Image (spheres, rainbow, N blue to C red):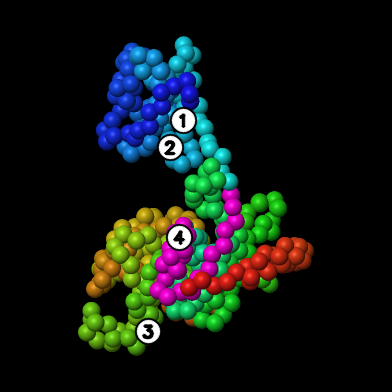
């Protein structure tokens, strides 16, 4: 760097690679040559406004640019070196250091707020909600529910936060019940990391608790409910989850789409057959994202919250069938995912022992 004049700047709105180099005394015939030589590594037409870049310029009277460094994000950047007759472009990546961090808290309003008070990345709350999606109803967190978590925090140059990695372990106390989660690879062939509790039970279930990540239940399954829209008693055979228009709706389990259409009362809706026993339906969508016959995976976005059909506000009406009969999904004892092999269980219990002791030793922060 001492051999160059260093200029740090950001790409302006509508600014091109050619305009940047021209401003630093590189003429257009040479710019065109550079652009063609590096196109297999970096498309100079794809500069994005607001992205930082660095120019290394000659220290002589010309102050002509010699090297252009484009920063894609905190970690990744592209270096284009054209100071010599040989033009070279390469992608580079800064070294990332991963440190295990701990956090805890007591719920007063929401999990996100409890973590935000401690300056913890919002993705930790998102990851916790996904880990516990099958065991804890995050729409019904109670005041004074408590949690502890051990997670990976990534740093650049030891000090600059670069996002979070996987959660290693967590403990949730919800309505006076204890829920542990430990990350573990139980299948060495696939290498997939899953989460299990302190007794080696899989946290994942065949069905998610709800079709939305963050929302609230605005109306429950109730066969004697009086529906304001109709002005009379009419069975409500669904569970309504209120959320802003445009919120993504997820399939609660793997299955095949058997209906994706518009119907007067239902509005835009999708119905999925999961197996010979279970079906689910999602009503009042703004738009649908899947077609009849399409196979969808658990957690896949199938549409977006709207107000189509007979509805007084934005929500998704979630309906659930068991053996051809509509039932309350919140009262079903749903099947669990494939259990851990008995031969692996002793190794797992030994593995989590020290992690559990470390987690239990974490004090709750208000």
Answer above or below: position of 179 versus 340. below
Out of 198 and 12, give the one closest to the viewer.
12
- Residue visible at 37% across and 60% down? 248
How far apart are the two marked residues, 2 and 1, measured between alpha carbons?
A: 8 Å
- Density class for disc 3 (Cα within 10 Å; few <14, some 14-19, many ≥20) is some
Query: Which quadrant would residue 350 be assigned to in this image?
Result: bottom right
Left-right relation of 349 to 124: right
Crowd class of label 4 (few under 14; some 14 to 19; many from 20; radius 10 Å): few
- Real-space Cα separation, disc 2 to disc 3, in angstroms: 52 Å
Tag of residue 222: 3
Residue 59 position in % (x across, y down): 41, 18
* Circles 2 and 1: CB atoms closer than 8 Å: yes
Give the residue at mark 2: 72
> Cβ–Cβ below 8 Å for labels 1 and 4?
no
Q: Is mark 1 on a helix, strand or loop?
A: strand
Which residues, given as a range, are shown in magenta? 98-122
- Which of marks 3 and 2 precedes in the sequence? 2
Q: In which quarter of the image is residue 186?
A: bottom right
Disc 4 and disc 2 in contact, CB within 8 angstroms: no
């Amino acid at each position: 760097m001492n051999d160059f004049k260093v200029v740090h700047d950001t790409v302006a709105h509508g600014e091109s690679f050619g305009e940047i180099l021209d401003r630093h005394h590189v003429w257009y015939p040479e710019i065109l040559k550079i652009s063609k030589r590096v196109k297999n590594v970096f498309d100079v037409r794809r500069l994005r406004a607001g992205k930082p870049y660095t120019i290394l310029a000659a220290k002589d009277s010309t102050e002509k640019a010699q090297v252009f460094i484009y920063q894609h994000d905190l970690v990744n950047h592209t270096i284009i070196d054209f100071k010599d007759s040989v033009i070279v472009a390469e992608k580079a990546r800064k070294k990332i250091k991963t440190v295990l961090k701990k956090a805890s808290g007591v719920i007063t309003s929401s999990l996100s707020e409890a973590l935000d008070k401690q300056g913890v990345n919002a993705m930790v709350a998102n990851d916790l909600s996904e880990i516990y999606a099958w065991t804890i109803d995050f729409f019904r967190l109670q005041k004074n529910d408590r949690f502890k978590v051990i997670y990976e925090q990534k740093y650049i140059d030891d000090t600059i936060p670069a996002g979070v990695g996987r959660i290693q372990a967590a403990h949730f106390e919800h309505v006076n019940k204890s829920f542990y989660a430990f990350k573990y690879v139980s299948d060495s062939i696939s290498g997939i990391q899953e989460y299990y509790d302190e007794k080696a039970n899989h946290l994942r279930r065949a069905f998610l608790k709800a079709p939305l990540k963050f929302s609230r239940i605005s109306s429950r399954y109730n066969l004697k409910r009086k529906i304001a829209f109709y002005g009379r008693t009419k069975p409500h055979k669904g569970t309504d989850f209120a959320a802003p228009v445009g919120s993504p709706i997820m399939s609660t389990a793997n299955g095949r789409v058997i209906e994706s259409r518009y119907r007067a009362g239902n509005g835009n809706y999708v119905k999925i057959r999961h197996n010979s026993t279970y079906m689910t339906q999602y009503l009042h969508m703004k738009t649908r994202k899947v077609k009849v016959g399409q196979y969808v995976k658990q957690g896949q976005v199938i549409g977006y919250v709207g107000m189509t059909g007979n509805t007084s506000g934005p929500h998704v009406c979630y309906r659930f069938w068991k053996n051809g009969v509509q039932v309350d999904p919140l009262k079903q004892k749903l099947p669990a995912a494939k259990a851990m092999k008995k031969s692996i269980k002793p190794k797992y219990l030994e593995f989590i022992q020290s992690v559990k002791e470390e987690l239990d030793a974490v004090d709750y922060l208000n």
